[in-house]
Image (cartoon, helix red, strand yellow):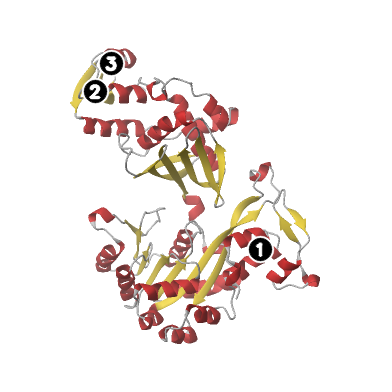
Amino acid sequence: MNADLSYAFARDKGLVVLDGADDNVRVAVRHGADPFALIEARRVLRRPMTLQAMAPQEFERALTEHYAREGVSGDEAEAALDSQGLASLVDGIPETADLLDGDDDAPVIRLINGLIYEAVNRKASDVHIEPHEDTLSVRYRIDGVLQEVLTPSRRLAAPLTSRIKVMARLDIAEKRVPQDGRISLSIGGRSIDVRVSTLPSRYGERVTMRLLDTRNALLGLDELGMDEATLTRFREILAQPNGITLVTGPTGSGKTTTLYSALSVLNNGERNVMTLEDPIEYGLEGISQTQMHHKVGLTFAATLRAILRHDPDVVMVGEIRDLETAKVAFEFASTGRPVLSTVHTNSAAGAIQRLRDMGIEPYVLAATLKAVIAQRLVRKLCDHCKKPHASTSEELAMFGLSAGEAPQMWRPVGCMACGNSGYNGRLGVYELITVDGGLRDLIRADGSEDDIQDMAFAKYDTLFRNAARYVKTGQTSVEEVLRVCRREEER
């Protein structure tokens, strides 16, 4: 393998390798670069050099392009972690006066490799890197809850952030504004897409990396964790030829996974299925996906109007955020084709009220809305360490049980298998409103959210009742259900 310049040397001295054959190498030279650095570069590269002058901005792009190719090596990260662990990777970084002046980037690269590999191994959805006054906080979001994994010295903030920004092809010189980028990598034969976001904070830039693993997202409807009754009703809804189906819930509740699962059912090869997403989280085979770009006017509403001229049979809109998008979506659905989308509300009935508040007329809602599904994710108790406990009178009353019929309830403990959290994995919780004749009349008459809630769930489970089944079967704890589902939803 040909020798290369270290990232720190290339950045600080204004030299970067562009390309080269065995007998020659082309090197970009930033305006104002140290001419004596060329001697050191020639010594390291051990080949004749052809120099190309570059303006600072052009040089930054070339620097990012060259060093972003290195990516993350899953094999190296696994080997490093097996032999050392994350804390040892931090200890292996030399205590120089200024880490950015070091000639060897390998320790920082190994730490980033280890952080991402360990996050994937522990099924984390996000990695948070946040500088504080004296320390750097590194946390994983596992099963929806943040867990601190490292608190090294703040001296690591600059090299870590700089290196991650290079991998994500961001502007390393710009520290005053937020930036967004992506890293595509492969670990253990699995394709992982990492969404990187930086944000200026008091003690420097914080970095959040969202890990998108296609294997975890593309689930069949049977794998979502719906109870049998809800699953049957949901399949019946997807079999209908038109109308809007909405999925609602907070960020990280699995809405995108549910939508993709529904699209996989509708994508039978005979339909033109098109999606509008911000951002596109996972690639779907056989489906046309369009990324929103608000800076150039590629908004949900504008793009939805455009794709209607591409003869779609099914449209998925990432999110209904405003009246304009809602109107176009409802107009399309009224032409006799299905639309799937999301709305950010706390309950299924709340989604109907949100659309009315946006300005959608009740008669349009009643005629076009097909169903609303609200969902949450509760953490699953670790099978290795959960322990039983006697039900309290309050818990029995909460779930409408008498002392004689009380099931065995369980609590989290914590062990090595679950990272001492007491939980391992998550379970889906759902409530589904299907707009039938009675509910359609109530919506058309502008009935209140409470009236809609009462009518819709007279025979079916609310979120709270649906989550209670996991408590009764010992799969989760009472505390976890109360953390995720508001008790007052059981009215």
Taking 446 as reference, is 175 left or right?
left
Q: Position of residue 233 (x, y in %)?
A: 53, 75
Residue placed at 45% from the left, 83% from the top? 447
| Quarter where residue 267 is shown | bottom left
Say which amino acid is labelled 1. Answer: Tyr
Please give the label number shown on residue 192.
none
Label 3: how many residues lie within 10 Å, few (<14), some (14-19) or many (20+)?
some
Foreground pick, 236 / 163: 163
First of labels 2, 1 by sequence position: 2
The quarter of the rendered structure image containing the N terminus is: top left
Which structural element holds mark 2? strand
Say which amino acid is labelled 2. Answer: Arg
Circle 1 is placed at which residue position? 470
First of labels 3, 1 by sequence position: 3
First of labels 2, 3 by sequence position: 2
Circle 3 is placed at which residue position? 37
Residue placed at 37% from the left, 58% from the top? 286
Badge 2 vs badge 1, beta-carbon distance below 8 Å: no
Circle 2 is placed at which residue position? 26
Residue 489 vertical placement versus 447 (above, below):
above
Taking 49 as reference, is 281 left or right?
right
Query: Mark 2 against mark 1, which lies toward the viewer?
Result: 1
Q: Position of residue 449 (x, y in %)?
A: 48, 78
